[in-house]
Image (cartoon, rainbow, N blue to C red):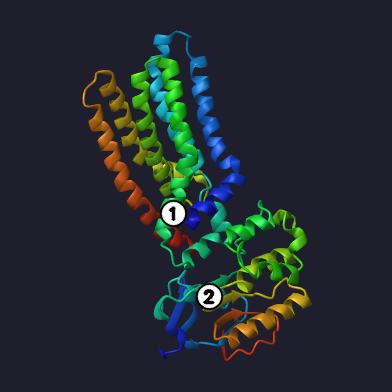
Amino acid sequence: MTDNSLITAKTISYKINENKLFHNLSFELGEGCALLIKGKNGSGKSTLLRIILGITVPTKGNIYKAASIQICYLGHKNALKSYLTMRDNIDLMQLKNHKELNYYLDLLSLKKHLDVTVSSLSFGQQKKLALLRVFLNTSKLLILDEPFVGLDDATHEQLTNFLSNELIMGKGLIFTSHIPCEIKADSLVLIN
Amino acid sequence: MEILKVEFLKLRKKTRIWLGPILVFWLIMIAYPLTVELLQDKLQIGFFSVLWIAILISMMLATEDIFTEDYNDGSLEQTIIQESSFSTNIGLKVFIYWFLTGIPVSILSFIFSFGTTQNFGLSLSIFPLALISSYIFLNLFVLGNSLSLNKGSVLGAIVTMPIALPVLIVLGKSITALQFDINFEGFILLLLGSLSIIIVLVPIVVSYIIRAHLE
């Protein structure tokens, strides 16, 4: 593990009922680096992300994280409360007092829906709301599972630009995506 | 302490979760005199048994979906990856549920007890018993519900009931002690001792169970 390393995976293996998802996987992610995890459906991309997060325990191997590293995670589930308004959800995400909140609400065209319940929003709008967690993050490492799904072209571009800037600022990014994007990923792991 | 604010916000919007159990408790206590002859001495005979069972049922209802929603929408994953202790967050969540259901139910227990027995001293002693027992039951049902997460609350209730039975027995004995004025404080201390162990152990055990579910 080098000095600027955020995450180091050493010989990670994971199997479910004798079905090996991946075997002896090793990689290291440093500051300002991105890792795009690609693979077929069911190849274990989301599982690998959950292993990195510490939610799932690998069958073999270890994950080493930089000391007291904060992680921003956006998974398949948006962690939004469908019965609450967008404003309440922002409050739940503890982003209410963030100085850049208004800017991103305008950018993502969410401001006029602030008092609308999440269940009344479209899938894309819900995804944008969940993405506020990413846009307003204060973490050193971003872990995103299919972040571009459900986004229109404009938001796709905004997210791409944002993540590229985050990399320039020295943050780390690990993500999965079936949708082509222009983020310069330093490493690529293909899982079969 | 952000978890307190977050849970309060959620429960403020989802009144069904905490108001439902209180109303069920209230309905049971209202319905009880209607099912026996309206003679005060006969009402008192079974009153406390009904009271403890009503508290048990209301706490079971209060915890029915305590983790289900957060499990389904991904909030539990977000909680786990935070730096703060997951078990502490669970302990605080249980406390808020108790604050919103256990305390009102305990106040109602005092009122119904006074209304039935017309004995202020006895009813006043019921209040701490109801406070402690509701917190114990709530923790036990939280344990059961975590075990049966996403498998329905019935399984959780079945798992929890055998653990709750000794508490019901102690509550029954404490009423006898109260009525005969023999070592009532001993029963309070016994329940407090049990509670102090439970509120430490249950969040830790539940945090491991939920982690296993998320895996």
Q: Is residue B173 above or below residue B38?
A: below
Where is A138 relative to B182, above or below? below
| Tally of numbered discs | 2
Residue A156 at x, y = what percent?
73, 78
Residue B159 image position (x, y, % from top left): 41, 44
Mark 2 lies on residue? A139
Name the foreground residue: B91 vs A175. B91
- Residue at 29% from the left image edge and 37% from the top image edge: B191
The residue identified by callout 1 is B90
Gap between marks 1 and 2, in whole Å? 24 Å
Residue A192 appears at what percent x and percent y?
A: 57, 84
Chain to which the residue tagged by mark 1 belongs? B
Horizontally, residue B140 falls left or right of residue B8, namely: left
Q: Residue at x 62, y 46 (%)?
A: B13
Left/right placement of residue A115 relative to residue B123 reads right
Relative horizontal placement of residue B70, taking residue A183 as reference (left or right): left
Q: What's the residue type where badge 1 is placed? A: Ile
Q: Secondary structure at mark 2?
A: loop
**Residue A44 circle label:** none
Is disc 2 surrounded by few (<14), some (14 to 19) or many (20+) residues within 10 Å? some
Q: Is residue A44 visible?
A: no
Q: Who's the residue at 57% across and 78% down the image?
A: A43
Which residue is nearer to you in this view: B122 or A111? A111
Which amino acid lies under the numbered mark 2 shown in the image of this protein? Ser
Relative placement, left or right, of B127 versus A165 is left
Question: In the image, residue B177 lies at what x, y percent?
Answer: 25, 23
Host chain of mark 2: A
Q: Are marks 1 and 2 on the same chain?
A: no
Residue B148 visible in image: yes
Q: State the image quarter where residue B158 is shown.
A: top left
